[in-house]
Image (tube, rainbow, N blue to C red):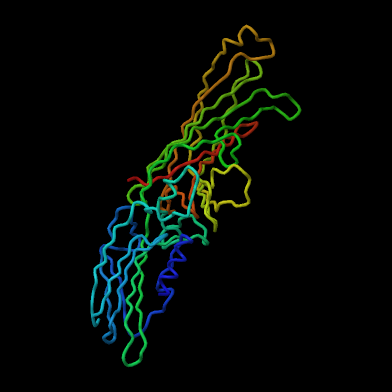
Amino acid sequence: MTSLRQSHQMEELGISKAASKIRNWRKSGKLEIELADHYLAKIYSSGSVVQGHLSISPASDIYASSITMSLDGVTTILGLNNPHKESLAQNTFPVHFTLSTGLNGLYTRCRINNCHRQAFDPPPTIGGEWDRHDMSPGVVEVEYGINACIASTPSLDTGHSQDFTAKRAIQFIPRLSESPPLHVSLMNRRYKLQGTKSLRSNSFKRPFGIISATAMQPEPLHLQAYGTVITPSFIDVTLTFDPENDGITPPKLDSVSLSIRSNTWHQADPYQAFPDQIEKPSLKQPFITSIELTVDRPQVTWARHVNPGLEDKSSENSSVAFYSSTLQLPLSVSTRNKTFLPTFHSCLVSRTYDVSLRLGFKKGDLTIAAPLQIIADP
């Protein structure tokens, strides 16, 4: 059957097409999928039950050879095929599916090193009928929906068969658990957990000190209530200042800017590793959307420390003291204008996030880029 063959090809690409796009509706009949308690903005999750009924109203009696209903996503997750030989004048058929918590090994052709669990997680709906933009490019699309097809036997009068098709799309966000923190090396081109700057009064003079910032990977943001509420998190940053000489005080923090960047990765061939963790230079870059966060400039309280090991070796031109401070900046985002999808990795499409932080001092800036997970609570 054309629609099944086309669906199989889309399954290999990781994207399914509606059967209604393969065959046009016939004016001589009507096929409808009605879902119980469904509305346009409703979001389904792992374990959600999708139920309702399929109704057919042909203009005249037809004899159906089969009735097929399937829940299609990245692949056909569940299917129902009922051989049917009775005449259909006005009939309804129950629809009942439970959304899976995993892909059950359907991605057997996808081999991502050391990350099999995430590769088998179902991706969320991407580029669908979200009422708020999901920060994905138009070329990437992952659909979930109920497809139905009723195939009739050839008519005795015309000798032609007639197929009825229908589709009802649903929005899906899977429940994905937290992954371990990433190992971020100094060679990583995407993430930067430490920044250092030599401070000079002007370009012709020696530095009067070195200031550094080191960030911890923040705790994940938690999607709750099927993607409509996000629990805030924090990013902790440790500042250190090493003055060139005693008597030099730490610089004043003049400005802070904080943003979360959404990265949508996609390619035609299966990934061999998580795309955000590949350290080799690549021409394939993600589609990035940046969301600026509101943050107040914190009051920095410096603590002075003396290194006893340098106390006896000090000279007039060197300092035996350094300063440190700790900042905790809130990561709070709103779902009012954006749909935040959870962090996920599949064979062809991934979504990652990072926190971009800039600390502005009078004689130089420090920048941090830390990986951030967004997870959908089970």
Q: Nearer the viewer, residue 375 or 344?
A: 344
The relative height of residue 95 versus residue 305 in the rendered view (above or below) is below
Q: In this view, does 331 lie to the left or right of 64?
A: right
Q: Can you tell which quarter of the image residue 1 is in?
A: bottom left
Q: In this view, does 21 lie to the left or right of 306?
A: left
Percent x, y of residue 256: 54, 37
The relative height of residue 245 versus residue 285 in the rendered view (above or below) is above
Residue at the image point whose x is 60% and y is 20% from the top: 249
Percent x, y of residue 101: 34, 51
The furthest residue to the top: 312
Q: In this view, does 63 lie to the left or right of 182?
A: left
Q: Nearer the viewer, residue 231 or 342?
A: 342
Residue at the image point whose x is 52% and y is 58% from the top: 137
The relative height of residue 210 versus residue 366 in the rendered view (above or below) is above
Percent x, y of residue 11: 44, 62
Percent x, y of residue 108: 44, 54
Residue at the image point whose x is 54% and y is 17% from the top: 304
Q: Nearer the viewer, residue 361 or 344?
A: 344
Q: Can you tell which quarter of the image residue 203 is in?
A: top right
Q: How many labels does the image show?
A: 0
Q: Can you tell which quarter of the image residue 103 is in?
A: bottom left
The relative height of residue 327 versus residue 125 in the rendered view (above or below) is above
The furthest residue to the bottom: 157
